[in-house]
């Protein structure tokens, strides 16, 4: 079992010291989904939701969230992010979200990608909740990552 790195020998939470780690290009891809009723789905698909461009706003929210991850997750390092890309796929009354985050540094961008995908889903929920109070956000996971000591990781669900 791997040693937990966010605790010192007394069990106190600490920020990991990455100063000795090798800088490398880091990429993480996270996915999430939100399912909804037909009315909410068609509002997104036909771009006629009364609150505006749902996916455009969700894309911006995801990008902004990636940049603010260290403000939200207590032990995350503030990172110089070089790329955030949010894509959406609509199918079967569901919006599938993919967030890609890239940086060149000493620590990975998995939390930034997960935060971006989650926030995009939450934004879709917020913009469509008048049409569907039973939307379900789910399937939030790290799809793949590359760079760093642990190398490439791929997780297909």
Image (cartoon, rainbow, N blue to C red):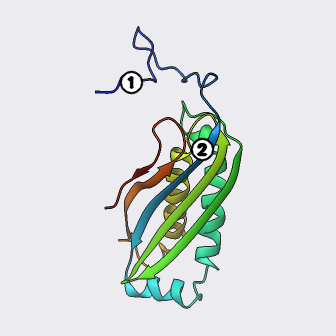
Q: Using residue 52 as the reference point, say whether residue 7 is left or right of it.
A: left
Name the outermost residue toward the bottom. 46
Residue shown at 41% from the left, 76% from the top: 132
Q: Is mark 2 on a helix, strand or loop?
A: helix
**Which of 65 and 17 lies nearest the eye of the viewer?**
17
Residue 18 x/y as whole percent = 59, 25
Q: Using residue 109 as the reference point, say whether residue 32 is left or right of it.
A: left
Residue shown at 59% from the left, 44% from the top: 69
Tag shown at residue 4: 1
Mark 2 or mark 1: which comes first in sequence?
A: 1
Residue 66 x/y as whole percent = 61, 51
Q: Is mark 1 on a helix, strand or loop?
A: loop
**Which of 89 and 13 lies nearest the eye of the viewer?**
89
The residue to which callout 2 is attached is: 69
Q: Quadrant of the C terminus?
A: bottom left
Quadrant of the rendered image containing residue 74: top right
Query: Measured along the vertical axis of the image, is residue 91 above or below residue 81?
Result: below
């Amino acid at each position: 079992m791997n040693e937990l790195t966010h605790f010192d020998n007394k069990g106190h939470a600490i920020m990991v010291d990455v100063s000795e780690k090798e800088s490398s290009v880091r990429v993480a891809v996270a996915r999430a989904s939100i399912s909804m009723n037909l009315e909410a789905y068609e509002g997104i698909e036909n771009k006629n939701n009364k609150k505006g461009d749902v996916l455009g706003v969700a894309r911006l929210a995801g990008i902004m969230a990636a940049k603010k991850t260290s403000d939200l997750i207590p032990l995350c390092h503030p990172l110089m992010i070089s790329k955030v890309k949010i894509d959406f796929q609509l199918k079967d009354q569901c919006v599938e979200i993919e967030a890609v985050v890239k940086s060149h540094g000493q620590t990975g961008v998995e939390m930034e990608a997960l935060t971006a995908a989650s926030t995009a889903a939450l934004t879709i929920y917020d913009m469509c909740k008048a049409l569907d109070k039973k939307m379900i956000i789910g399937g939030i996971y790290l799809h793949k990552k590359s760079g760093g000591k642990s190398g490439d990781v791929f997780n297909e669900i």
